[in-house]
Amino acid sequence: MVTELICYKQKMIKLDFDILNELDNVGNEAYKLIVELFPICRSITGEGVRKSLKIIQDQIPIKINEVPSGQKVYDWIIPKEWNIRDAYIKNSKGEKIVNFQKSNLHVMSYSVPIKGKFSLEELKKHLHSLQEYPEWIPYLTSYYNENWGFCISHNQLKNLTDDEYEVKIDSELKDGSLTYGEFVIPGKREEQILLSCYVCHPSMCNDNLTGVALLTLLAKYLRDKELEYTYHFLFIPETIGAITWLSQNEDKVSKIKCGLVATCLGDCGISTYKKTKNGNSIIDRIVKKVLDDSKSKFELVDFFPSGSDERQFSSPGFNLEIGSLMRAMYGKFPEYHTSADNLDFINTESLSDSFKKYLNVILVLENNKIFRSLNPKCEPQLGRRGLYRLIGSQKNEHLDELAILWVLNMSDGTNSLLDISECAGLSFLQVKKTAQILFEKNLLEIVENN
Ligand code: ZN
């Protein structure tokens, strides 16, 4: 047992801020994973989710859970499992004018099976398009209302002529299960950081394959690192998956310190952070600090109770501090929930930047220590300890001296490095590096890792 523990320890690699200057390939890796996942027809249940989770399993050994249809989860019931083989609309000449094999967005998700002949007028009741973007196919679902429908471009809809159309949706709605993936990386503490994404959208990229790829690679990166906190990754169908997971893990929820929902991370827009309900929780402050320190533009958005799974996690029975770090926010970019949210809409640079921001958030969480000055009565004499020489050797002499003074002054055993960096208007990394030097010079002691 002891030997095993030592071996486990030896495998642990320290997590360091320097890594943010490396990881050059992460954007390409994420993009490659998205390309692999893109063609699969996913929904809130079914083979598409299983197939996607198996692809994720090639990267990290996630646990795949199945929860049977009909099971009650709080006020909801796990729906029947939906699968689809094929679907089309043929005109009277036998030409397939709409073909599921060309785009899985053509069929409204959860469409019941149908086979029959329809006049244009009858068929139109089941056709959906986007007038504002006449070339794009919209993405629609009907999970909890038995219905069927096709989504087509508005240009195609306009050009349909009076005819008799043959319609077939070869789908199946039957008792099965809801599938979700879970991966836990243990840290020194039982306290958990929840990182969640959804795996229920068919062929669309920004919403949400970017979140899936980013969390997969983040888990892969963190799994052999020495960690303070325990990291809990969820790959769940949106809404019903979060409700199911919460209902199955109610006893563990108290261990969750904070977390993020990962979505919309590959477009060329600036970062957007949707705050937790609290608005000033530890995760809100850390994300804001990371974005401030990035020196690039960003937007902060107050919590609102629609959006993604943060709304389940922060429902009054749980009140978890879960925010969402994105780029362009869902619903705010025209390509959202359409065929234009495709592989051309995302890019490797944005994926890489988003990944590094998530990793930076984790680095701040992991390093947010509280120190106490070992020389609390007046300032220690810095020159005698070679600290001025050290300052002089660095780029910005004044700022570094100021950083030392800030850290010494505020290290009273109650302020964390994040508190100091916010108060001083200095980057977290500078405050952390300063504290490290002062610690090595025996001017500070560690009180706790916040
Ligand atoms: Zn969506």
Image (cartoon, helix red, strand yellow):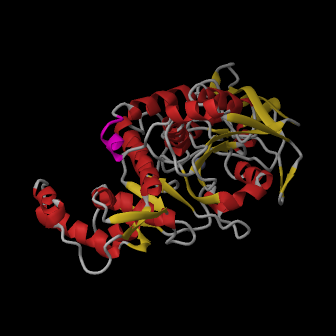
Query: Which residue does the image show at 43% across and 72% down from the upper left?
Result: 413
Q: Quadrant of residue 403?
A: bottom left
Relative image position of residue 163 (x, y in whole percent): 69, 31
Q: Which of 384 and 173 is in front in this view?
A: 384
**On the rendered structure, is 141 left or right of 103?**
right
Name the residue rendered at 59%, 39% in the picture: 157
Q: Is residue 20 magenta?
A: yes
Front residue (pair 86, 380): 380
Whether residue 258 is visible here, answered yes or no, is yes
* 172 relative to 328, above or below: above
Residue 262, above or below 346: below
Residue stretch in magenta:
17-23
Say which of 69 and 392 sits in front: 392
Q: In which quarter of the image is the N terminus?
A: top right
Asked whether, in this view, residue 383 is left or right of residue 245, the answer is: left
Residue 167 seen from this side = no
Where residue 117 appears, x then y in whole percent?
Answer: 79, 30
Across and down, in percent, residue 379 comes to: 23, 76
Magenta-drawn stretch contains 195:
no
Residue drawn 83% across the image and 47% down it: 78
Principal secondary structure, stretch drawn in magenta: helix
Residue farthest bottom in this picture: 377
Q: Which quadrant of the view contains residue 384?
A: bottom left
Nearest the camera: 58 or 432?
A: 432
Q: Residue 296: which quarter of the image?
A: bottom left
Q: Position of residue 420 (x, y in %)?
A: 35, 70
Tell whether 422 sits left or right of 84. Answer: left
Residue at 61%, 44% in the rendered image: 186
